[in-house]
Image (spheres, grey):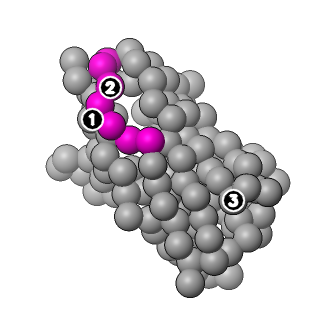
Amino acid sequence: QVHLVESGGGLAHAGGSLRLSCKASGISISDYIMGWFRDAPGKTRELVAGINTDGTTNYTASVRGRFTISRDNPNQLVYLQMDSLKPEDTAVYYCSSYGSNHLHWGQGTQVTVSS
């Protein structure tokens, strides 16, 4: 069973930083596209950042240049480094995996950014 556990969320001030971590089990993440989604108030779930198996990345425009997704495949970890945080980044952030036509989600971690 795929299990993804996020951590690292919390409170930050505008302009501050947080690093989210995702620990995976039940899969070898080297075989999966990994990503971070978020549910912000009043918005649908959106893809924030994705990282392919070859290490290439993509970001939604609103976070590009501020957030960085990375992998540590041997340790089954995915990170989202969030810098220059804005109140609009406030959301529940979910780690995700995609492979063999299956999408999985973690339980989410809350990020709150105050102004």
Q: Quadrant of the N terminus?
A: bottom right
Percent across and percent down for residue 24 are 60, 64
- Three-letter code, disc 3: Gln
Q: Note whether 99 is above or below 23 in the view shown.
A: below
Real-space CA distance between mark 1 and mark 2, rounded to the nearest whole angstrom: 6 Å
Say if the magenta span includes residue 10. Answer: yes
Q: Which mark is residue 112?
A: 1
Q: Which residue is mark 2?
A: 12
Q: Secondary structure at mark 1?
A: strand
Residue numbers of the magenta segment: 8-14
The first of marks 3 and 1 along the sequence is: 3
Percent across and percent down for residue 34 are 62, 59
Would you say 65 lies left or right of 40 here? right
Real-space CA distance between mark 3 and mark 1, rounded to the nearest whole angstrom: 26 Å
Q: Is residue 37 visible?
A: no
- Three-letter code, disc 2: Ala
Badge 3 local density, few (<14 within 10 Å), some, or many (20+)?
some
Q: Which residue is mark 3?
A: 76
The first of marks 2 and 3 along the sequence is: 2
Would you say 83 lies left or right of 41 here? right
Asked if disc 1 and disc 2 are in contact, CB closer than 8 Å, the reply is: yes
- Three-letter code, disc 1: Thr
